[in-house]
Amino acid sequence: MSASRATIREIVLTPIAFRDPPLLNAIGVHEPWALRTIVEIHTDAGPLGLGETYGDQGHLERLRRVAPTLVGLDVFALNAVRAQVARTLGGTVGGDRHGLTGHINLGGTIDRVFASFEVALLDIQGQLLGRPVCDLLGGAVRDRVAYSAYLFYKWAAHPGEAPDAFGEALDPAGIVAQARAFIDRHGFSAIKLKGGVFPPEQETAAVQALRAAFPQHLLRIDPNAAWTVETSLAVARELDGVIEYLEDPTPGIEDMGRVAAGTPIPLATNMCVVAYDHIAPAVEHKAIRVLLGDHHYWGGLVRSRQLALICETFGIGMSMHSNSHLGISLMAMTHLAAATPNLGYACDTHYPWNSADEIIAGGALQFVDGALPVPTTPGLGVTLDRDALARAHERYLDCAIRVRDDTAYMQRFHPGYSGVLPRW
Amino acid sequence: MSASRATIREIVLTPIAFRDPPLLNAIGVHEPWALRTIVEIHTDAGPLGLGETYGDQGHLERLRRVAPTLVGLDVFALNAVRAQVARTLGGTVGGDRHGLTGHINLGGTIDRVFASFEVALLDIQGQLLGRPVCDLLGGAVRDRVAYSAYLFYKWAAHPGEAPDAFGEALDPAGIVAQARAFIDRHGFSAIKLKGGVFPPEQETAAVQALRAAFPQHLLRIDPNAAWTVETSLAVARELDGVIEYLEDPTPGIEDMGRVAAGTPIPLATNMCVVAYDHIAPAVEHKAIRVLLGDHHYWGGLVRSRQLALICETFGIGMSMHSNSHLGISLMAMTHLAAATPNLGYACDTHYPWNSADEIIAGGALQFVDGALPVPTTPGLGVTLDRDALARAHERYLDCAIRVRDDTAYMQRFHPGYSGVLPRW
């Protein structure tokens, strides 16, 4: 019985940038570069722990404030690490939204920062134990984790650039073609359409076109709160029996509750419930039947397992949310999903859009039949490609982007564009 | 990085009995012998894991049905172990209530059986890691865990026996004397009075006598649902400003909600919320502000940590419940309490009433200033005294008790006694 001592010796934070296609959403369009921060936790005991988190400037600054205060803490002391994060942040509330993940409060800010370190600490714990991270979460209940084909309306190219490999998708035929390409390549059996871009009639037509083209696939649409209650109910009538859930049709817990009361389709969210404080009001208003978890903002993998029990306790199903990300995040998501019994849906992932710029050794992770096998090697099961990481950091230094702003990028080409929601 | 493989080779279940004084409660009086089951999980890798759980016949039979089906499972596969427990039990719902812990449903039955094994598995995990069990729960946030002086009205002796060492306590003066003895010996700074035995006027007089005798001590009273809503509200008016919480004044979530609406004193429970299914209704009816957790029926230590996050999420404080128990349970409770940041109250424990018949090596654990130091040795930090265990098992075989029944025991001496609640 060897003692597994390990304390944090140094934390290295490396902001990176990777190519992101011009994916359209309810508040604008993805910029040419997506940002992330790679977290390395070095210990006095050998193992190196890896994490991946947001790269927006505000978040990065918070990580930089917190990181030195964690040096000397035990890698198993997750409670103490979170308390230290809270102490260091004081009352700081993050204003950056990392895209479309709803209003951030103090608890959510702490959880975002804590999660950035927690995954790396679990990576170390797993390596010390000789166990995959999922074993620290109760053990895998499945040997593969299914992901969904995450479809976006998109331009053929970023303005001024050559067309990308993915092609244009601005109507139902384009969306079906995109789905075909994703499914042929990755084998996904669930499809999510990011909506909120075009009038709802056009987007429901795209869903119906997907239904016709892929009669066996599970379908979802996520307009990111672009619709009023009335529009949401009209779309729900149209899509009843067609989709497995309707994600964030309208803004706010109360209006989500009004939509939920008027449709048999389960409502899902990663916008109106994005911190623990939002759960009680959502329960009170019966606003959702599916929560899209995301360890990056729900406080890491262990707290996400606890979140899953909260959902089970209140009869809420679980799916998984994604932002633009690379392989360290994907592996963390896979360990979590593997160890979450009540995860009832294929997880969302942007990975196919971004994986060409992978920074882990071995290059991009490959989906098999729409799923990733659950890792069985110690820790997270990934190591860094130092050259690729250095290149990604150079891209970060070279690109002008420091805070994701889909709306401002859209306004460069459409000056009258407004990101105010709901739009229809 | 050594791999920490360990699978379950054999599970040994040893029912034991230990002396229990004639402690009075709302449904009768404790019998001369309290029952528990000691769980030993043997692995192919060396470490032996220990657990302690209920000894009632029905529960013991369920443990015996489940135990062989767990052989061969990985000691880290908590999700798989719980799923196997559920499969083996099928739809079996436990009818035994182990005293006054409320209605047991299917989920609660699974959690009771699973918890019996989970603690022993965590003991093994901790030993493999060279870490105390609290490190598997996020790490200790305190270095000592405070317990409360758990006072009971009691007879001087079990009928027909010589007086025990604790003395009679049947009025306020007797309760104050009992508190004095417990505090002198163990240093407790919180006091819980088990009520529901005498008319409420007499019990509130006892609380006021405790307040006068121990002006700095935190006080609670638990009548085990012996009072109507009206009586509860009358007592609450009398004790406002005197007690830190009022535990289970009246039966049922709805009536607890009615009492809660009429008093500023926080209501606590280990009766109307004893399984995950009860939490949503309790939240809906605003029935409680403090939950007494208990890993023995909330599904073990990891799920109890998850329960703590549920409570935090819904603004419910946490305390800890106890049945008659020995040192393995006390150590498990201490690890859990150490790693639960939002545990805001001294934990209940029957331990001083029962510790003379301890079965762990080294004999009874000792409170220091009303608290136990958090263990820092690998695993739970306890080993068996095999001779003491053998004696305790002999006592089990010799005593006629197989199911705890405080009411039937009371009726042997008071044939007209009824355990129906509420009584006043």
Image: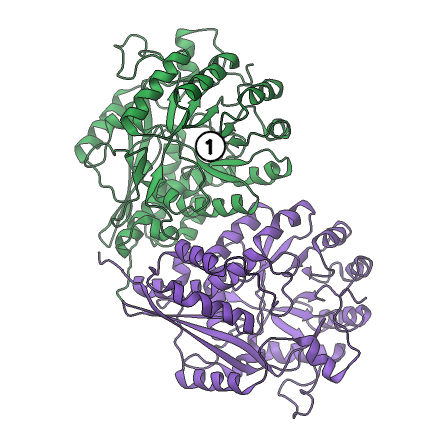
Chain colours: A green, B purple
Task: Answer with left or right where residue B179 lies relative to residue B295.
Answer: right
Secondary structure of the residue carrying tag 1 is loop
Instruction: Find residue B20 and report its horizontal and vertical position in percent.
Output: 60, 81
Q: Is residue B24 visible?
A: no
Closer to the camera in the image, A345 or A166: A345
- Up the image or down, A362 lies above or below B56; here it is above
Task: Answer with left or right where residue A67 lies relative to residue B109.
Answer: left
Q: Type of residue at label 1? A: Gly
Instruction: Find residue A35 and report its horizontal and vertical position in percent.
Output: 33, 27
Task: Answer with left or right where residue B166 lies relative to residue B254.
Answer: left
- Up the image or down, B22 lies above or below A304; here it is below
Closer to the camera in the image, A247 or A213: A213
- Up the image or down, A359 lies above or below A126; here it is above
Instruction: Find residue B302 and report its horizontal and vertical position in percent.
Output: 45, 56
Q: Which residue is mark 1?
A: A94
Residue extending farthest left? A387
- Up the image or down, A66 lies above or below B329; here it is above
Residue at 67% from the left image edge and 45% from the top image edge: B284
